[in-house]
Amino acid sequence: AQSVTQPDIHITVSEGASLELRCNYSYGATPYLFWYVQSPGQGLQLLLKYFSGDTLVQGIKGFEAEFKRSQSSFNLRKPSVHWSDAAEYFCAVGGPSGGSYIPTFGRGTSLIVHP
Amino acid sequence: NAGVTQTPKFQVLKTGQSMTLQCAQDMNHNSMYWYRQDPGMGLRLIYYSASEGTTDKGEVPNGYNVSRLNKREFSLRLESAAPSQTSVYFCASSVLEGPNQPQHFGDGTRLSIL
């Protein structure tokens, strides 16, 4: 069964600074990987996904993520954070688990942006 | 573009009361899901429906029932609400069930049980 770990519960950055949110997964084969963002009071929105091919994937809102098989990681990055990026970020991994193939979500990382 | 619509947005119940949370999607998706979100726990799958006419248990199904009314609608019922069911509930949908399927989420129902 797949699992996903987001080691950081909270991350604080200054506006304009770069950002990296960590995601580690456990899965035997090449996984399907996702990053979602949840703004306060709203549902989750897909930022980007990785299935195969180029290990650096571009998403919406200026985000990118890099798949590193050797490190079992799929970290989310942004070169310059805006105050509107303050939100909860969830990594998810897809693969067989308990008889279903529904992606499993990490516990989330809360991003705080200081002016 | 409505996407996934959940009703109600907020609800307060007393212990032992029953309630049905409604969810509808207008994207012609086959699969639908119910999650609960609790602080520090991320999203946990309660039930899902891979296609119209089928439902299956997720990680935390106890205390809940679901109905896939038609392709568009998927409801979640609490028969006898308990304080432990205080949470934010999200409905989601995807084109198909599968590990490579991105999900589309509603804005959630915030449920408090006293």
Image: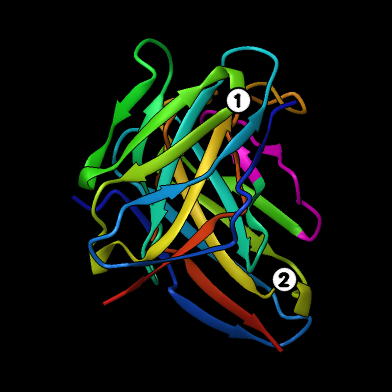
Residue nearest the observer in this picture, A6 or A2: A6
Q: Position of residue A70 (x, y in %)?
A: 60, 18
Residue named by callout 1: A71
Residue named by callout 2: B85
Numbered label tally: 2
**Taking B84 as reference, is A31 left or right?**
left
Amino acid of disc 2: Gln
Looking at the picture, does residue B28 appear above or below residue B10?
above
Q: Secondary structure at mark 1?
A: helix
Marks 2 and 1, how far apart in space?
37 Å
Looking at the picture, does residue B99 appear above or below residue B89?
above
Q: Quadrant of the C terminus of chain B?
A: bottom right
Amino acid of disc 1: Gln
Q: Position of residue A35 (x, y in %)?
A: 43, 41
Marks 2/1 same chain:
no
Query: Which marked residue is nearer to the observer: mark 2 or mark 1?
Result: 1
Q: Quadrant of residue B38?
A: bottom right
